[in-house]
Image (cartoon, rainbow, N blue to C red):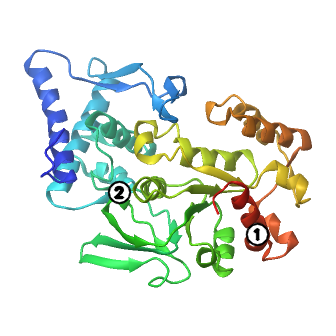
Amino acid sequence: MASDSKTSEEIARERLIDLAAEFYDQFDRGEIPEMKLPTRTKSNIEYDEDSHVWVYGDRTSTRSANSVRGARKLLKATYTIEFLARQLDEDRSSTLRELYYLSESWDAQEAHFSDQDESNQLVEDLEIVSNVTREDLHMRPEESGATLMGPLKIREQTRRGEREIHCQGDVGEGGYQIPNNPDTIEFLEHDIDFVMCVETGGMRDRLIENGFDEDYNALIVHLKGQPARATRRITKRLHDELDLPVVVFTDGDPWSYRIFGSVAYGSIKSAHLSEYLATPEARFVGIQPQDIVDYDLPTDPLADSDINALQSELEDPRFMTDYWEEQIELQLDIGKKAEQQALAARGLDFVTDEYLPTRLDEMGVI
């Protein structure tokens, strides 16, 4: 474990340099350079029953220079390590997209990335082997635009120094935009009773316009569809550090259930960071298939892809509970799905005056 006196950036740079030094040491010992990684396939992802998140299994794969393809991968890794170390030295940052284009300027043509998927995967590889996050490497995704709104006062670090923001009083209707690295945020004070993660922008706007955040002391986190890492990280911090309940409010379809799953249990793509990003205590607040029946909501028929996804979820450890099995079986039986906005069929205030208060009361959240 590194010294507490070192910054996360200093630790990240040291680990990158150590990784590059290992390649040189392998050369010096007369060995073919290689880099070992967990096998990043679905078959090597396990659901950890203790932590309730997705993690990598024991299988590993080796990137070795004993083939032309393997040598090129290590060459690209070396160039990327050099770039990231220099970036940290200069206290600069870049986006994942910029890294892909930057490789075009590297003098070895074999080090150029063929597409952005390749450069994205290499950054994930370096996260795993160095045990630091891409945020600490100063790598940013393209902006996700996710926001939060509610009775929370924070202090954030910016290039122009510190600033304090109240996420209701000091922001407009759009809310506070979650930064790429939410670990730079300090929670100062709050009057939050619970955190509500909302899938769609339309429903987020409805809750804010109706004053739901003020009436129920709720912090509204807009997931903006499948949530970005920064969104999941700040949600976890709000739960862990402020001891706040977290509920997830999505559409009533299998893809939205997976959005809930990524908030609560992590995703296969970021299994190496599940304990950093996932909030296993998060609870699902709707739309439930039972709601479609009880409220006679406007619906769309399940497509074949929806049916296949629901059947897959019945075999997913994250959804192997009595609640989920009952709801998914019901949805397959009725053959329908519904959006959050379908609640508007009962009036624009129905979601904040009746639906959510009833659901949250039943769950013991309010």
The image shows residue 63 at horizontal and vertical percentages of 32, 24
Q: Identify the secondary structure beneath mark 1.
A: helix
From where the camera sits, is residue 352 visible? yes
Q: Is residue 279 left or right of residue 303?
A: left
Q: Amino acid at mark 2?
A: Glu
Q: Identify the secondary structure beneath mark 2.
A: helix
Q: Which residue is mark 2?
A: 98
From where the camera sits, is residue 337 visible? no
Disc 1 crowd, CA 10 A, few/some/many (<14, 14-19, 20+): many
Nearer the observer, 85 or 194: 194
Disc 2 crowd, CA 10 A, few/some/many (<14, 14-19, 20+): some
The residue at the far top in this view is 30
The C terminus sits in image quarter: bottom right
The image shows residue 139 at horizontal and vertical percentages of 32, 54
Q: Which residue is mark 1?
A: 351
How many numbered dots are placed on residues in this image? Answer: 2
Q: Amino acid at mark 1?
A: Val
Q: Are marks 1 and 2 in contact (CB under 8 Å)?
A: no
**Between marks 1 and 2, how big is the CA–CA gap?**
42 Å
The residue at the far left in this view is 28
Q: Is residue 59 left or right of residue 348?
A: left
Picture residue at 46% right of the left edge, 53% below the top: 236
Nearer the observer, 341 or 211: 211
Picture residue at 84% right of the left edge, 45% below the top: 302
Q: Is residue 47 left or right of residue 113?
A: right
